Image (spheres, rainbow, N blue to C red):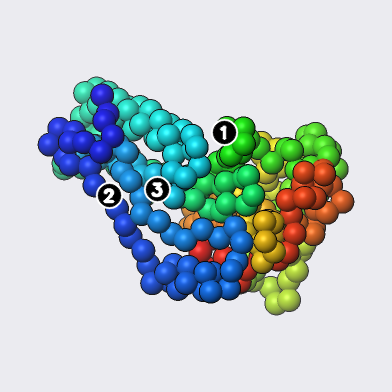
Amino acid sequence: MLEANTNWKGHMSIVRYGKSSRAFAVTLLALLLGWTGFVPQARAATVASAKMPYVEIGVDVDEALKPYPGLFDNCAAEAKSYAAAMRAQAEKEHRENPSAFRDGMAWTYDRSYALRSAVGRYISIVRSDDTFEGGAHPNHVVDTILWDTQAQKRISIRPFFTETADNGPTMTALAQAAKLAVASQKIADDIPVGDEDKLPANITPAQYLRKDTFINDGIKPSLLKLGPVTLAPSTEAGKSSGLTFHYSPYAVGPYAEGAHTVFVPWTALRQYLSPDGAALFGGTRPNGDADKW
């Protein structure tokens, strides 16, 4: 059984800090400028860990989640279940197929829950999984959680829009906006598209999108197929400036491209907002937010 913050088979759980100079600078600037929804980077508590010859597991939950009733415990419970499942999976594979752990190689599972933003009653969390199971390379998978502090439960972005039917007007517009945002980022990163060896000069996001099957296959006009999403902070008090989409490697491009994190401003979706959405969104995205997310 996994225990929180205790020894497990000789391995002492630790508290990890890890604050980069860039993150510190962004935090300081946010505090000076009074950006709303921005949350300073906090330390993370290791809620489950293991170190064995064939598997290493570490799961951290941002301690900045603790002020919101039920949120830290909700994430910690999920984290412990995940760690237990990965331990059982590795043990079974090691028992039945020891050659998969050649030359003393260990499988690794690292998960973290990080506070993305706090906007009114809504808290956005980014959950990151870094795993290695003996393949050609490690894998990195990102998912998100949106927490309603009043209801004390996880929700979707559904309440913020007048309708969210698959292939309906809202999901179609939101999917297209997310696709174009990814295309814009790939252009900025000078990533060739299609069969091209070099990015054509002056290519537009719309032109890029027509040639990029990864983006079109990875984002669909459905609430569950738009991609992991969080609320971005705003320069306006108590508001969100829009939606941030967090795409893992492989989600909208080949592995070599890595992850893509893109932003869609609320103004692009203004006509589809419900009364709750209209009350939630406003202002613009702080410049420093893009450096962190």
- Distance from disc 2 to disc 3, alpha carbons, whole Å, reads 10 Å
Q: Is residue 39 left or right of residue 8?
A: right
Which quadrant would the C terminus be assigned to in this image?
bottom right
Q: Given this view, does label 2 or label 3 mark the residue nearer the observer? A: 3
Camera-side residue: 141 or 44? Answer: 44
Residue that mark 3 sits on: 63
Q: Nearer the viewer, residue 203 or 167?
A: 167
Is residue 112 at all visible to an observer of this figure? no
Confirm or deny contact between disc 1 and disc 2 (CB under 8 A).
Answer: no
**Lower position in the chain sequence, tag 1 or tag 3:** 3
Residue at which label 2 appears? 15
Element on which disc 2 rests:
strand
> Pointer 1: what residue?
152
In percent of width and height, residue 143 lies at 53, 43
Residue 177, position as x, y percentages in the image: 75, 55
- Tag 3: residue type? Glu
Q: In this view, does 11 lie above or below 240?
A: above
Which three-letter amino acid code belongs to the residue tagged 2? Val
Amino acid at dot 1: Gln
Mark 2 or mark 3: whose residue is earlier in sequence:
2
- Separation of disc 1 and disc 3 at Cα? 17 Å
